[in-house]
């Protein structure tokens, strides 16, 4: 379990210890938004040929040398390149409004 000192970020680089409570510094901050074929997800025969909205944010407590998404997953909240604030309603609208989209996947 990650237990950073008061005022410090955890291993993931996005949760800070504030008075003993872990506070996310990346709420609503998104580092990647893509419409992907469902076949990119680890789902077998789940709506083949369909599209899904893929959303990713910064923050990962792993340090995999082979990670293909380290530029969008391992930056800390203060130095993340290109992340943008999204209201929850905007993400839902993006999922609903795109023709043929079947859902929202929180990924990367």
Image (tube, rainbow, N blue to C red):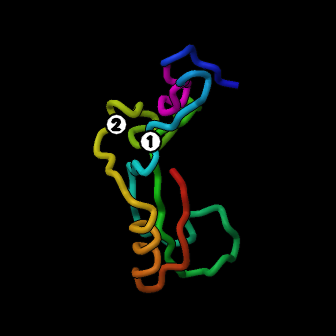
Identified at 28% across, 45% down, the residue is 82
| Circle 1: element type | loop
Q: Position of residue 25 (x, y in %)?
A: 45, 36
Marks 2 and 1 close (CB-CB < 8 Å) = yes
Q: Position of residue 91 (x, y in %)?
A: 43, 66
Identified at 51% across, 72% down, the residue is 52
| Circle 2: element type | loop
> Circle 1 sits on which residue?
26
Task: In the displayed orientation, state which residue is furthest to the left.
Answer: 82
Identified at 44% across, 41% down, the residue is 26
24 in relation to 102, above or below: above
Task: In the displayed orientation, state which residue is furthest to the bottom.
Answer: 99
Other residues around mark 2 within 10 Å, as few (<14) / some (14–19) / many (≥20): many
Is 69 in the magenta?
Answer: no
Other residues around mark 1 within 10 Å, as few (<14) / some (14–19) / many (≥20): many
Task: Give me the C-alpha separation between circle 2 and circle 1.
Answer: 10 Å
Quadrant occupied by the N terminus: top right
Which region is colored magenta?
A: 8-17
Q: Position of residue 84 (x, y in %)?
A: 32, 50
Q: Earlier in the sequence, mark 2 or mark 1?
A: 1
Is 11 in the magenta?
Answer: yes
Q: Position of residue 40 (x, y in %)?
A: 55, 64
Magenta stretch prevailing secondary structure: loop
Identified at 53% across, 34% down, the residue is 23
> Circle 2 sits on which residue?
80
Using the image as rendered, state which of residue 37 and residue 26 is in the foreground: 26
72 in relation to 41, above or below: above
**Among the 4 quarters of the image, the one containing residue 58:** top left
Which disc, if any, is residue 52?
none
35 in relation to 61, above or below: below
């Amino acid at each position: 379990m990650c237990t950073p000192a008061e005022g410090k970020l955890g291993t993931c680089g996005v949760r800070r210890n504030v008075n003993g409570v872990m506070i996310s510094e990346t709420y609503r901050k998104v580092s990647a938004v893509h419409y992907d074929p469902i076949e990119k997800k680890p789902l077998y025969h789940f709506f083949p040929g369909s599209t899904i909205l893929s959303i990713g944010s910064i923050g990962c407590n792993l340090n995999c040398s082979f990670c293909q998404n380290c530029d969008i997953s391992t930056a800390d909240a203060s130095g993340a390149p290109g992340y943008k604030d999204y209201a929850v309603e905007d993400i839902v609208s993006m999922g609903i409004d795109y023709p043929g989209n079947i859902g929202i996947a929180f990924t990367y």
